[in-house]
Structure formats: C-alpha cells, structure tokens
C-alpha cells in the first residue's frame, strides 16, 4: 500500500453554528455523491437564512457540510475514486481520495449526536427516508436509539421509509463468501466484507449517534432541493434548536423493509424493463435475464429498490423490499 498526498486543488469545508444554550449536536451532509446536489443547494438556502437572520440557532450546535466529497462534486459524478458511502472509516494508510475524506469526515461525525444525510436518486420516484435497525445488541449493527431515529423520520416531510439496509447487505456478503469458497477463490476485499456496506449513517450509529439518509427525489428534479431545505428546517425545529414550532409527525407513512439483494453476475445480465425504485412486483414477475438466458423471477410480492442497470459484474444489481407494518 502507498500513502497518497491529498489533492492540493480541493479542500474540505464545514460551517458550524453553536448557541450559548446547550442542546443537540446536529450535522447535515450534502453531496456525499457528487452528482447529488439537492443537499448542497438546500444547505446553501439554510446558510443564507442564518446569514440574513431569518433563522436563528437558539440551542445546541449544528454543522453543515455542503459538499462532503469535493472530488466527485467537481467532476459532477457519483464517485471520485470510489463510493464514499461504502467502507467508510478512518484509514491509517489512505489509498484513494475518499480515504482522505473519511479521515476528515469520520472524526467530525463522531463529535455530533445526530446526522441528516441528504441524497437523491437516478430514476423518477417519490422521496423517502432510510432508517436504521431496531434496538439490538447484535454483531452487525448494535443500536440503542431506534425510537429517536424513527421519531425524527416521521417529521422530515416525506411519506415513505425503508429499513433493513445493512442486515441485507450482510446476507449478500455471506452468500458471496460461500460462492467464492465453492469456486476455490479468495473472497474479494470489497464486495465480500460486511464493513464495505458501512456508509455515513452506519458509521454515525457505530460512534454513538443516530442518523437518517433522506433521498430527496430525482437528481434533476427541481423539487428535490426544496425537500432537502424543508427537511433541514424540520429537523432543527424538532430538536428544539430554532424557535419554530416542532413539526407534526406524518399521519401515515408507507414502511418497507429490505430483505434481499441480487448481484449482477455478468456484464450482459439485463433487466426485463427499465425499473425504478418502489416499482411493484408480484410473485412470478420477470425482473431480468442472466447472460445465459436464465430468468430472474420475483419470488414474492413486494417492490424493487435501487435497480442499477449499469452495475458492474459482482456488484449489487437490485434489492427487494416488502411491507413492514411494525414501523
């Protein structure tokens, strides 16, 4: 391994406001993926409101990171040298630009109590929020603040939530390891390591905080920055950090749990149609076809999530989710 020098033409930026009165420590991220700019624009509006004193922080501390990944943002692409929202942890020997980001960002996250991470997605669909696991003492993602997390999720202004990300990712890792052993090859350090599923929210939970990922809409949807902006204001008021009245919880939210991940095995694996997240599936529906003609069939009713027609062989192709009435 070799140590890399940080890019001299790029820098990391955060803006902090701290009130004289004690309160929660909130951090808000934009552009973890460089082509997802709604969070950057939403943060920019909030900073302008604060600058013009249309908004005041009366308790606690809030840190804004308008652009978490400046290399990806400068390129207008999802990734700089790799996906920042995978395998996120400080690195003693940085191997790529995102490792340098992690060495700055992870200690910053650890100094806060609550994270709101603002994203967008490729296909047209409704905004939704990703929440973490229920309280547990397991090995994959032990957690003790599910109630606080889900209470905030109901107040962001969206009507759909999804859980089950890291547990399902871990199931995919287990399957890939079994397949690697059966094929007599060494497991891949990225796709066959549970830690590779750790992004900003998972890291935040690992250091004692709680966190939400808000998917604000399609990348180019002009409404997405407004969703981000309103979510920041709602979070600040819910945490009693501004004088505004706390938002009412959503009267009804569609709740879904991710339960299965399917990998792309060959570059010529292809979907049967252009899928978008939350497209409905019925048992027996044709989702796609493997390069050898084998059909990929829905084994039950539910929805498809994060379909990626451009996924590389050996990486996640799509996820499946089903209704979660317990949310």
Image (tube, rainbow, N blue to C red):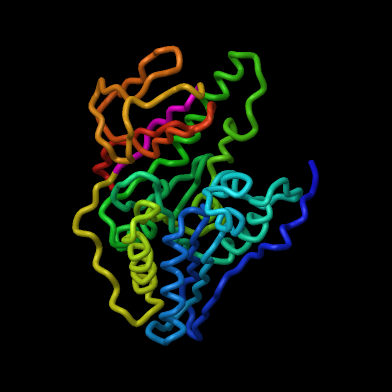
The residue at the point 24 percent across, 47 percent down is 254
Q: In the image, is 189 to the left or to the right of 202?
A: right
Is 313 drawn above or below residue 92 in the view shown?
above
Is 166 drawn above or below residue 113 in the view shown?
above
Magenta span main SS:
strand
- Residue 6: where, in percent of width, then height? 73, 57
- Image quarter of residue 309: top left
The residue at the point 65 percent across, 61 percent down is 104
Which is more toward the observer, 229 or 323? Answer: 229
Identify the image quadrant of the N terminus: top right
Question: Which residue is situated farthest in the left direction here?
Answer: 251
Q: Is residue 258 magenta?
A: yes
The residue at the point 53 percent across, 41 percent down is 197
The residue segment tinted magenta is 256-265
Which is more toward the observer, 196 or 223? Answer: 223
- Residue 199: where, in percent of width, then height? 53, 48
Q: In the image, is 218 to the left or to the right of 74?
A: left
């Amino acid at each position: 391994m070799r140590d890399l020098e940080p890019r001299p033409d790029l820098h990391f930026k955060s803006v902090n406001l701290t009130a004289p009165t004690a309160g929660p420590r909130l951090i808000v991220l934009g552009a973890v993926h460089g082509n997802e700019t709604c969070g950057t624009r939403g943060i920019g509006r909030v900073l302008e409101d604060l600058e013009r004193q249309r908004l005041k922080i009366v308790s606690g501390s809030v840190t804004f990171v308008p652009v978490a990944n400046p290399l990806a943002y400068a390129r207008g692409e999802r990734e700089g040298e790799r996906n920042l929202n995978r395998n996120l942890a400080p690195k003693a020997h940085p191997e790529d630009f995102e490792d340098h980001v992690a060495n700055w960002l992870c200690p910053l996250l650890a100094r806060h109590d609550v994270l709101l991470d603002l994203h967008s997605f490729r296909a047209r669909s409704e905004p939704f929020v990703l929440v973490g696991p229920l309280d547990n003492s397991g090995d994959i993602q032990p957690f003790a603040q599910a109630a606080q997390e889900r209470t905030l999720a109901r107040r962001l202004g969206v009507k759909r939530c999804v859980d089950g990300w890291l547990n399902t990712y871990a199931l995919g890792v287990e399957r890939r390891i079994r397949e690697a052993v059966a094929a007599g090859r060494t497991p891949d350090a990225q796709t066959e390591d549970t830690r590779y599923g750790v992004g900003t929210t998972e890291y935040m939970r690992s250091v004692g905080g709680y966190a939400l990922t808000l998917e604000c809409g399609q990348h180019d949807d002009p409404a997405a920055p407004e969703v981000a902006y309103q979510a920041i204001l709602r979070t600040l008021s819910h945490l009693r950090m501004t004088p505004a009245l706390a938002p009412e919880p959503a009267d009804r939210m569609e709740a879904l749990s991710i339960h299965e991940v399917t990998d792309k095995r060959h570059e010529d694996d292809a979907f049967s149609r252009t899928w978008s997240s939350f497209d409905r599936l019925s048992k027996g529906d044709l989702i796609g076809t493997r390069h050898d003609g084998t059909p990929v069939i829905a084994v039950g009713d539910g929805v498809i999530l994060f379909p990626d027609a451009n996924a590389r062989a050996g990486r996640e192709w799509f996820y499946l989710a089903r209704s979660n009435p317990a949310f």
